[in-house]
Amino acid sequence: MQYVIYIIFLLVSALGLAELIHAVWLFLSTQKGKNNKLLICYLTGDKPDLELRYVIEQIRWQGSRYADRVVAISNIDDLKLLNKCTEIASKSDVLFINSEYIKSEN
């Protein structure tokens, strides 16, 4: 039993150390000032609303290390799901674009 606790402790320590190294690397490698990070994500799959929520959670947890602005693009045919994604995006300052809208503009 004692060995199991040691192994769990070592795994958690290694993951924490990896996260710390990642944070330091991001801090040192990103330029401060004028450059903003823009995340463009294409929502695919059956549940684009859950994918959009996941991206928003990443922004909440990681802040500007992850991205300063988010543009979410999807191809949703269902009007109910489209309205749901638009509502989620508007509450969290994410620009949500449906690809059908892009096609109709051309």
Image (spheres, helix red, strand yellow):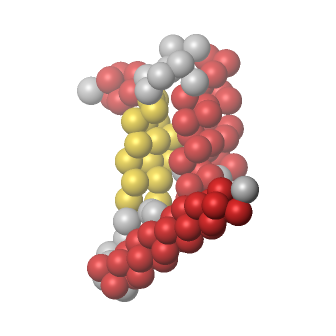
Q: Residue at x 58, y 61 (%)?
A: 7
Q: Is residue 46 visible to the viewer in this orientation of the structure? A: yes
Comparing 41 with 100, the one in front is 41
Residue 34 visible, this angle? no
Instruction: Please name the residue shown 61% across and 31% down the image.
Output: 49
Q: Quadrant of the N terminus?
A: bottom right
Residue at point 50% right, 68% down? 14
Location of residue 3 with respect to 29 vertically, above or below:
above
Q: Answer left or right for 81 relative to 22.
A: right
User: Image height check: is 20 above or below 11?
Assistant: below
Please provide percent x and percent y for residue 102.
35, 30
**Camera-side residue of 17 and 30:** 17
- Quadrant assignment, res 37: bottom left
Where does the C terminus fall, quadrant-wise? top left
- In this orientation, which residue lies closer to the viewer: 99 or 38? 38
x and y percentages locating residue 52 in the rendered image? 56, 40
Left or right of 89, for residue 44 = left
Task: From this view, report whether residue 6 is shown above or below residue 48.
Answer: below
